[in-house]
Image (cartoon, rainbow, N blue to C red):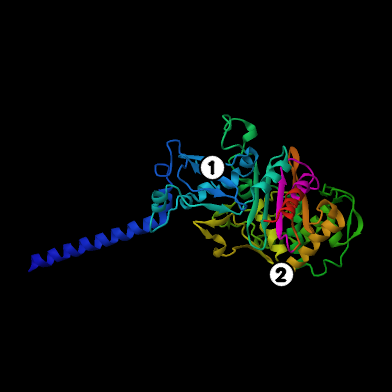
Amino acid sequence: MKITVRRAYVFYAVILAFLAGTVILVVNIAMNGKTWVANPANRHLYSRSNDVVSAGPVVDIRGNILAETQGNKRVYNDDVVIRKAVLHVLGDTNGYISTGTQNLYSDSLSGYNFVDGIYTLKKHGVGPELVMNIDSEACRVAYEALGNFNGAVAVYNYKTGQLLCSVSKPTYDLVNKPDDIDTNPSYSGTYLDKVVSGLYTPGSIMKIITAACAIENIPDIYERTFDCNGEYVVTKGQRGVICNDDHGEGLTFEEAMNKSCNAVFAQIAIELGADKLKATADSMGFNSELYAREVRIKYSRFNPPANDKLELGWAGIGQSKTLVNPTHFLAIMGAIANGGDGYAPDRIYTMNGENTNKRGTEVMISIDPETARQLDYLLRSNIANEYGDSRFPNLEMCGKTGTAQITGATSHSWFVGYSQRDDLPLAVVCVAENAGSGMKTAVNVSNKVMQHFLNNPY
């Protein structure tokens, strides 16, 4: 009898071990299946040169082929300029550009799913088609408009979250990869998609955040007037925050925004204090890890000093140690244009044959609706009353320029903005490295890519 009982216990232990092993296996497959399938050792997907030879085609929103498999080889768009313009958002098949679509969605391109594995690939010989929201011609326009400058340009639909244009420079041609890419300084940072992974000193576009804090914390901000003699002196006898001009006396808050007056906004930042400024910035996604769907965004950094008023003044106008990410600021523009909700930019239109819009729009940034309304008014006033609508013909643009001073180098040129047209709900961000005034290169690039969408509705 005792022997029978012992055998029963052993039998039960074996069953429990088997069930536990099965559970562990299923959990591991669920958690790691995509990674295992995408491993370069999987010769169903990869050639000996680690090229994804069986992946499905990738096309843009207008049906133009960006990448596809032909004869056991991955091939790309025939146009070398388009190949360079879409490089970072499309990505390579070797994983050098970690945030590229071909890397992030390698499992989807292979047709992998938890139940069938890569059965679709084995049955059809190639994975399913992936359609991107990206307009490759818009990327060409942005790429060519940047000229010899490096930087980042992005456009998205602030009503749907569709990322329609995403360009990062420096770049290269996937078909003819330079032999000196790892040694030539001109290719420094070329594997980095600056749209999602770049960090830049923002300059005056940061005044949008300072303005939001003022709107929420200074009740009479619109009734006040300010003076500017070219410098805001914090401590008598010492250098203060230098302004870009002598704007004179009696400036209203709106006029100070229009003229991007450093002196006024440094004064406002110091009056608000570090805690309130940081609280407003944090509420808009600063100092937080953000995601644009599956793409992790390099988080923007804003930690103004509480015990150094001069440095606080510089931080309030986008200098000091402040750093921002282009995609993050694009979502902030979307939130203002949308009356509060800034959606996460989404690069994928259909995946595995299903429209990804069914996933719904994800809110990346939230702004108080009344604050958004007042910022919308100020940003429209900038264009109408200072920059001139002639810089953005027929676009009904709102926006802010930035000239970010860089130690020992020419300033970065910034523009962030959006169209108020109901038939063109698009926001744009442009940073052109070492290109000088935001009123020049960044405005020009932003206008050209927005005109493309005005003339070529998608």
- Determine whether 346 is above or below 4 in the image: above
Question: Which residue is painted at 7% across and 69% down in the image?
Answer: 1
Measured as percent of width and height from the top left, residue 125 is found at: 42, 47
- Determine whether 455 is above or below 16 in the image: above
Q: What residue is shown with label 2? A: 369
Marks 2 and 1 sit apart, C-alpha to C-alpha, by: 41 Å
The residue lying toward the viewer, choosing from 377 and 226, is: 377
Residue type at tag 1: Asp
Is residue 443 magenta-colored? yes
Is residue 257 visible in the rendered image? The answer is no
Q: Nearer the viewer, mark 2 or mark 1?
A: 1
Residue type at tag 2: Pro
Question: Which residue is painted at 70% across and 55% down in the image?
Answer: 304
Question: Which segment did they paint magenta?
Answer: 422-446
Q: Image check: 9 left or right of 400?
A: left
Residue most extreme to the left = 1
The reply to whether the C-beta atoms of the residues labelled 2 and 1 are less than 8 Å apart is no
Measured as percent of width and height from the top left, residue 381 is found at: 83, 60
Which secondary structure lies at badge 2?
helix
Which secondary structure lies at badge 1?
loop
Question: Which residue is painted at 80% across and 45% down in the image?
Answer: 440
- Determine whether 357 is above or below 188 in the image: below
- Quadrant for residue 252, please give it: bottom right
